[in-house]
Image (cartoon, helix red, strand yellow):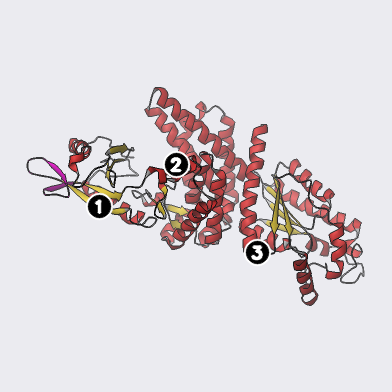
Amino acid sequence: MSINIRIPPLFEEIQQAMGSPGFYPHEVFNLERRDTHISSVFLTGRWVYKLKKPLDFGFLDFGSLEARHRFCQCEVSLNRRLSQGVYEDVVAIRQTEDGGLNLEGRGKTVEYAVKMRQLPDDAGLDRLLARNRTTSEDMRKLGRTLAAFYETAQRGPDIDRYGSREAISFNVEENFRQLEPFVDRFPDREKWDLLCQVSRHFLEHHPALFQRRVDEGRIRDGHGDLRAEHVYFQDGIQIIDCIEFNDRFRYGDVALDLAFLHSDMEHQGHGESSRAVLAAYAEGAGDPGLYAVLDFYAAYRAVVRLKVACFRSEETEGEEKSRCLEKARTYLDQAYRYAVQFGLPTLWVFCGLPASGKSTLAEATADALSLSVFESDRVRKEEPKEGAPQVSPFGEGPYREAMRHRVYARLLARAQDQLKSGRSVVLDATFSRRKWREDARQLARDVDANLVFVECACAESTLRSRMEAREKEPGLSDARLRHLPRMIAAFEPPVECTPSTLVRVSTDRSPREALGELLAESYARRSEQVMERIGKT
């Protein structure tokens, strides 16, 4: 990789000139300079001017004036996708014959800058979150804005390949290799080892999941650097500073972009707000599968920030070095938490009365997350027939006590096989008895799995109308309207379930709405379980 970090004298003269209010052909209210490792930004009160430093890092080449001009133009056009009236134009900095410098005046063009409308710092999402000045509706608007953006963002075969398992694996392994010199300095090497292990396991054992994201059109030309500090609530929602200097850093699964924002907001202690953004995006984009890959990509993003902190610690001394090392520690902890979340399988237990919508919701969840689903009705049908009528009275025939215990034992045995191999699984049954739920809880403990109980409920009138429909079009379930009073009386509500394991979902509404709520709420529950688990270790 070519690295050139020498700043030419003329560029330094330009920086110095732009540090003077008299340089600008308009009123300057408050002149401030802010530098990053690749740019110099000058804020004047109304307008902002951004210079690209003449550097060549291999993956970024601003070495020539032509390249800087081209990337300034790219920055303006790309960032206009997610902002309105912010990116004004690319302006020229010129040098007169006597060596003077001016902005858009006469003379030879010696540099270019991006001209932007200055957004107030206090309108930045990071500042708003820190002052608790955001609302749930703000977060939903942001999620919907992102959904609309990705819907129209560029895609195609050349972009799709960045969502392939092979491309993702290459990037993951590159991060691991680049961090190897720092690993022995980590205070807890076990966390790093687990992170590497589960990331590789996830990539190896979920090829169909990554291919499905490609097939669904989820690989797009995104933002590439979607952090809270780049989001502004000013004249609507303005999202700025996407990556313009290397296309491949923007290309990828939309979940990769969203995972960066999610991990950044969680890092700042605003996980609930982030989950509201994700839920609104998933609903607006029709992308419930986001939750199948979110933690994997969030861990990847945390590792990238861990790497940056480690690299910067090598370039600094004293207090600044200590701050970098502390950041590295917190990013490792964050990546480890995400790794535990996607590394552990989850036992999903759908419970509720027949016709409560649990089978529909269980199947939708299994489909969205690419999981296996086992249904009690299907297992029951596997039993040898004993000459009983097709629909037996409640508690008789295939629904007698001994047979029901046998069905639940088989369900849990099949779930155990999946969980032991590291795969999450969905169980669909009434789980109307506390004992059967306790058996499921014990299974999750035995195999060290996360556990989510989903209680599906709806109005009795809805139950009745659905059961009446079954009389005309019978399905897998034998439950009928005449059974309903006794089923209601026999159902033991899951009052014993802890808040971190139980999600209650109303199924009176559309299956899509119910699924969206379930995936958002269950993600929060699983995060709580992992935090409890980590706290005990």
* Residue 74 shows in the view: no
Q: Quadrant of residue 485?
A: bottom right
Q: Quadrant of the N terminus?
A: top left
- Residue at 62% from the left image edge and 49% from the top image edge: 523
Residue 479's place in the image compared with 186, above or below, is below
Residue beneath disc 2: 127
Amino acid type of the residue that numbered disc 3 sits on in the rendered structure: Pro
Amino acid type of the residue that numbered disc 1 sits on in the rendered structure: Val
Q: Helix, strand or loop at disc 1?
A: strand
Q: Name the front one of labels 3 and 2.
A: 2
Q: Helix, strand or loop at disc 3?
A: helix
| Coordinates of residue 482 in the picture (x, y in percent) | 86, 69
**Horizontally, is 198 left or right of 247 in the view?**
right
Mark carried by residue 90: 1
Residue beneath disc 3: 511
Amino acid type of the residue that numbered disc 2 sits on in the rendered structure: Arg
| Coordinates of residue 136 in the picture (x, y in percent) | 54, 51
Near-viewer residue (97 or 54): 97
| Coordinates of residue 43 in the picture (x, y in percent) | 29, 42
**Horizontally, is 85 left or right of 276 in the view?**
left
Q: CA distance from mark 1 to mark 3?
A: 49 Å
Q: Name the front one of labels 1 and 2.
A: 2
Near-viewer residue (324 or 116): 116
Q: Are marks 1 and 3 in contact (CB under 8 Å)?
A: no
- Residue at 76% from the left image edge and 70% from the top image edge: 466
| Range drawn in magenta | 97-110
